[in-house]
Every structure is written in structure tokens, then in C-alpha cells.
Image (cartoon, rainbow, N blue to C red):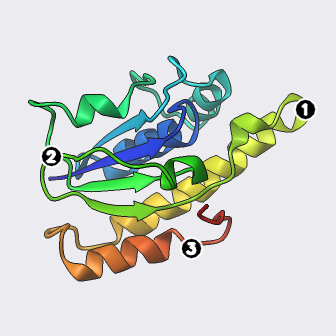
Amino acid sequence: MTSILFLCTGNSARSILAEALANHLGEGRLTTYSAGSFPKGAPHPMALAVLADHAITGEFSSKSWDVFAAAGAPPIDIVITVCDNAAGEVCPIFPGRAVKAHWGIADPAAVEGAGQRAAFEQAFAEMQARITALLEMDLSDPAAPHVRAALNDIGHMPGATRRR
């Protein structure tokens, strides 16, 4: 089974959406996690509301990426950054043969007021499209060059933000 870590700065919105969608749509084919370089401490309430509205529930938490770099951490095959800030940061050394990719999506948590739900729904839809494309891939050897190339192609799907 392929293990994927979705990283973002705060681990409260996009990475939570990615983890939830990958676990839900993957139907047991993936083991997914999320973490942040500077976790907020809790998932964004609107992220949880949007997930619930799409019948996706679970035990989501905001945690540091240090959890996955420590001794005894679960092995990670693929690390995907989902926000521009995390893409430019120095990543810790992850256990295993982690392949890295970047799927930038605009930060829905940066939108406040009446447009916030629409921003989260947009992020959800963009992440869902990327996870669906991921699930169409042959992940039997996550370190294969074609996997890295396909993951990077997914990162350029509509709605992608630029890497800083």
C-alpha cells in the first residue's frame, strides 16, 4: 500500500482536505496523512464543514511534520506539498524513499466572510480532481520516474498556484 504525506504550512485546510479525500476516494488503496511546518493546532472549521457536507468524516488533526521525520514514524512513499509556502521550505528527511511533488492550490483559509465557503468548495473540487488523477496512476513502485513525472503533471492541473 502506498503511503502519502500531504504537507502545508498550517495543516488546517488544504492538507486536511487532501488527506480526507485521498482516504475516502482511495477506498483502502492508500495510507494518507497530513502535517504542517507550523501547524495551527486544529483543522479549520470550514474545512471540516465542507468535508461533512460531502459525507467525508474522520479524526482529522493539525500536527507537525516532525511527527513523520522522527524515529519510528510510519514510512512515507510520497510527500506532496499543497500550498506555496510549504513548497519553498526545507523539508525534513523523511523515512523511506519519499518522492516529492507540489500541488499548489489557493489558500481558502485566507478568504474571510461571505466568500469563504465558496473558496473552500473550490479548493475541495481542485483537490478532488488531483486525487482522482492520482488514483488512476500505477503506484506499485512510487519511486519510478514515471510516477514523479505524473505527480508533477497533476500539480499543473487547473487552479494550480505558482511555486515560490
Residue 104: percent from left, percent from top? 58, 58
The residue sitting at 23% across, 52% down in the picture is: 29
**Is there a contact, CB below 8 Å, between mark 3 and mark 1?**
no
What is the C-alpha distance between the residues marked 3 and 2?
27 Å
The residue sitting at 46% across, 27% down in the picture is: 57
Describe residue 151's horizontal placement relative to residue 120 as left or right. left
Q: Which residue is mark 2?
A: 95
Q: Which is nearer the eye, 36 or 28?
A: 36
As shown in the figure, which amino acid type bears the numbered disc 3?
His
Residue 11: percent from left, percent from top? 50, 33
**Is there a contact, CB below 8 Å, between mark 1 and mark 2?**
no
Q: Secondary structure at mark 2?
A: loop
As shown in the figure, which amino acid type bears the numbered disc 2?
Pro
What is the C-alpha distance between the residues marked 1 and 2?
42 Å
Going from N to C along the chain, the mark reached first, 3 or 2, is 2
Query: Which residue is situated farthest in the top direction here?
Result: 41
Q: Which residue is mark 3?
A: 156
Describe residue 131's horizontal placement relative to residue 73 as left or right. right
* Residue 161 to residue 61: above or below: below
Give me the disc on residue 114.
1
As shown in the figure, which amino acid type bears the numbered disc 1?
Ala
